[in-house]
Image: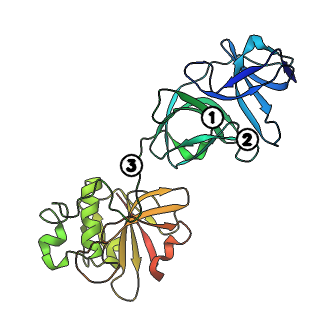
Amino acid sequence: MSTMKSAQTVYYGPSTSIYPSVGSVSSGETVTALWKEGDWTHIEYSVTGTSKKKRGYVRTDTVNITESVSTITVQNYTRYVLTSATTYTGPGSTGYVEAGSVSRGETVIYLGQKINNYAFIEYTITGTSQKKRAYFYADYLTATPITPQLVVGERPSDMNIYGECYFSKNWYYQSDPTLVGQCTWFCWGRALEKCGRSIRFNGDNNAKNWYSNAISGYSSKQPSTVYPMKNAIACFSDSKNGHVVFIEDVVGSTVYYTEANADRNNELSDDDGIVKIASTTDFPSLYGKTLVGYIVL
């Protein structure tokens, strides 16, 4: 264990101007030196009066280091936040104090250190020019830019349910304008609007037969046993016409989907196209119907 030569402010990163204070340590206090970075050392210390700890940076010349620590050069990998969640001052949600939070879609920098599946990241503090370095659950990060936040009860920002993809360019509307408001009309239009796909069928195009009769305008068909996936149409069967829904995104164990005619009024309604959610466990039996498979766009 190392000890502090003098009382020091601890910072979220290796700078007194870019990063705010995460706390402080006292002269003679015992700390753990984790690594060196330039003229700074990343340390872990106990929070007085609690069972929790914090990690942060102090100048190396203020610490009597007794551990064998390496000097690292942090990496700079751009990552995107999949799920809005809390950041922590150390690699865990129970033993360390909360540092703040990041939001879905936010761009952060992964610094190349991962412990207990918590990634060490750097992000900008909203409304300021300052930054924090903290630990964030690694599975909530992706290297691929993602769509904006989907708001339950609202239509996606990239949806125009009164636009040409649902009317003048919509195969169902062209065939029979009275089909506007049906689940098949909606999913066909959403596939064209979001993914540029025009699905074609051989035979009956009722919802319950979409999976078996779709012949073009998609990337693949996947069986009902696979995990729900983004930008896919889930096809359900029942004793009548079945149902199809459009999967906008899958985040963790939550499926974000849109649909039409859930109210069975067979016309365009205010609730058609709004974002709804279901767990990945419950999704295959949505509305008590049987999931046949996915048409992946």
Along the polypeptide, which appears first: circle 2 or circle 1? 2
Q: CA distance from mark 2 to mark 3?
A: 30 Å
Instruction: Please name the residue shown 68% across and 11% down the image.
Output: 39
Q: Position of residue 64 (x, y in %)?
A: 84, 14
Q: Secondary structure at mark 3?
A: loop
User: Is 93 situated above or below 15?
Assistant: below
Binning the other alpha carbons within 10 Å of mark 3 as few (below 14), some (14 to 19) or many (20 upward) gives few
Q: In terms of image quadrants, where is residue 35?
A: top right
Residue 239 appears anywhere in the view: yes
Q: Nearer the viewer, residue 172 or 98?
A: 98
Q: Amino acid at mark 1?
A: Ala
Along the polypeptide, which appears first: circle 1 or circle 3? 1
Q: Is residue 39 left or right of residue 255?
A: right
| Marking on residue 178 | none
Which residue lies most toward the bottom here? 239
Instruction: Please name the residue shown 27% across and 58% down the image.
Output: 159
Q: Position of residue 198 (x, y in %)?
A: 23, 60
Q: Find disc 2 in the rendering and name its residue.
A: 96
Q: Secondary structure at mark 2?
A: loop
Q: Find disc 3 in the rendering and name its residue.
A: 148
Q: Is residue 105 left or right of residue 5?
A: left
Number of on-image labels? 3
Q: Find disc 1 in the rendering and name its residue.
A: 134
Q: Amino acid at mark 3?
A: Pro
Q: CA distance from mark 2 to mark 1?
A: 11 Å
